Each structure stands twice: as C-alpha cells, then as structure tokens.
Image (cartoon, rainbow, N blue to C red):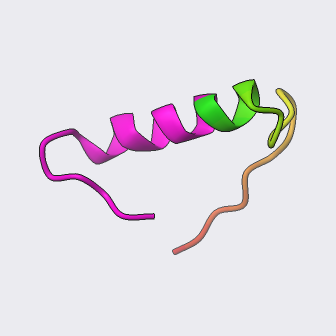
C-alpha cells in the first residue's frame, strides 16, 4: 500500500478497511493480521 502525504495514514488505513468490508473482501468480524 502506498500512502498519500496529504492525508493522515491512520485515516487511509481506516478507509482501506472500510472499503474492503463493503466490497466483501473482509467480513465484519474477521481479524486483520498485524505487520511490523
């Protein structure tokens, strides 16, 4: 994922998660793996 500099990263991640749920790629109760 490439982040845009004009929007906070946490907002971009939240948008990505919401879009994936709406498009059926993630279910509402599915855990998202952490990556460090």
Relative height, residue 13 to residue 3 (above, below): above
Residue positioned 81% across, 46% down in the render: 31
Q: Is residue 11 left or right of residue 21?
A: left
Measuring from the top left, give residue 11's x and y in whole percent.
36, 34
Residue positioned 53% across, 40% down in the render: 16
Magenta stretch: residue 25 in it? no
Measuring from the top left, give residue 9's x and y in whole percent.
30, 47
Q: Is residue 14 left or right of residue 11?
A: right
Indicate the quadrant containing the N terminus: top left, top right, bottom left or bottom right.
Answer: bottom left
Measuring from the top left, give residue 10's x and y in whole percent.
36, 41
Relative height, residue 13 to residue 19 (above, below): below
Q: Image quarter for residue 8?
A: top left
Q: Which region of the structure is painted magenta?
A: 1-18
In front: 1, or 30?
Answer: 1
Residue situated furthest bottom in the rendering: 36
In front: 25, or 8?
Answer: 25
């Amino acid at each position: 994922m490439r982040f845009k500099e004009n929007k906070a990263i946490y907002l971009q991640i939240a948008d990505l998660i919401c879009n994936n749920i709406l498009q059926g790629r993630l279910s509402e109760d599915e855990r998202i793996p952490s990556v460090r």
